[in-house]
Image (cartoon, helix red, strand yellow):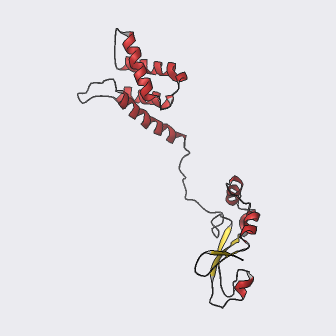
């Protein structure tokens, strides 16, 4: 809450006083208590404090079955719970069905994982000169890039320092060594 919420909080606080039948002939004391509660609840949004007040008015009963005005920490705890509940209401509902990739081959990343091996080389000149049993992993652009909505949305929203064409250019001179690590050609 901010200082601009002080009047709305005062109405909420007065509603709590009425609901819990708290009376006092000393308005200065009541104003001082209002300030104490306002400072204690200041770190929470007004709507959460108001929602907590409504909940406390309905359910705040002591062990002896009698209702009593909550302390500032009790109201704060209730307001934190109300804030969580309000935030959960703002979230969209959970998916009814499991996620489905538009292209299960690349998982909508736009890249296909491949293994350079005899009969399916990566196209690197040095790989064609290697012995037949030499293999290494590499990635290649997926053909779904032009039509895959998920890939295009991720690409457009970024953050990526490269466009797909720049990424291909940046990785064109990089190849993987047999035991790990990358080396520039």
Q: Height in image: 134 above or below 158?
A: below
Q: Is residue 165 left or right of residue 176?
A: right
Q: Quadrant of the C terminus?
A: bottom right
Picture coordinates of residue 25, whole percent (x, y): 34, 8
Q: Residue furthest front?
A: 184
Residue at 53% of width from left, 26% of height from top?
Answer: 2
Residue at 50% of width from left, 21% of height from top?
Answer: 6
Q: Height in image: 182 above or below 79?
A: below
Q: Is residue 24 left or right of residue 136?
A: left
Total marks shown come to 0
Residue at 67% of width from left, 58% of height from top?
Answer: 150
Q: Is residue 134 visible?
A: yes
Closer to us: 62 or 123: 123
Closer to us: 46 or 43: 43
Q: Is residue 114 visible?
A: no
Splitting the image into 4 quarters, where does residue 17 fall?
top left
Q: Residue furthest top?
A: 25
Residue at 48% of width from left, 22% of height from top?
Answer: 9
Q: Is residue 37 left or right of residue 184?
A: left
Splitting the image into 4 quarters, where does residue 127 fall?
bottom right
Picture coordinates of residue 63, whole percent (x, y): 24, 30
Closer to us: 19 or 140: 140
Q: Residue furthest left?
A: 64
Splitting the image into 4 quarters, where does residue 59 fall?
top left
Picture coordinates of residue 157, whole percent (x, y): 69, 52
């Amino acid at each position: 809450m901010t200082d601009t919420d002080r009047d709305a909080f005062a109405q909420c606080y007065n509603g709590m006083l009425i609901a819990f039948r708290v009376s006092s002939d000393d308005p200065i004391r009541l104003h001082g208590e209002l300030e104490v509660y306002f400072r204690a609840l200041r770190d929470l949004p007004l709507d959460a404090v108001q929602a907590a007040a409504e909940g406390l008015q309905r359910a705040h009963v002591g062990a002896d079955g009698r209702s009593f005005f909550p302390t500032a920490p009790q109201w704060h705890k209730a307001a934190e719970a109300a804030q969580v509940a309000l935030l959960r209401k703002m979230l969209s509902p959970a998916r009814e069905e499991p996620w489905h990739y538009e292209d299960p081959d690349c998982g909508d990343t736009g890249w296909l994982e491949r293994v350079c091996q005899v009969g399916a080389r990566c196209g690197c000149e040095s790989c064609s000169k290697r012995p037949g049993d030499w293999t290494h992993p590499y990635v290649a652009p997926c053909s779904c890039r032009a039509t895959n909505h998920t890939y295009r949305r991720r690409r457009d929203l970024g953050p990526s320092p490269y466009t797909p064409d720049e990424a291909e250019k940046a990785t064109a001179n990089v190849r993987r060594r047999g035991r790990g690590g990358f080396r520039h050609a």
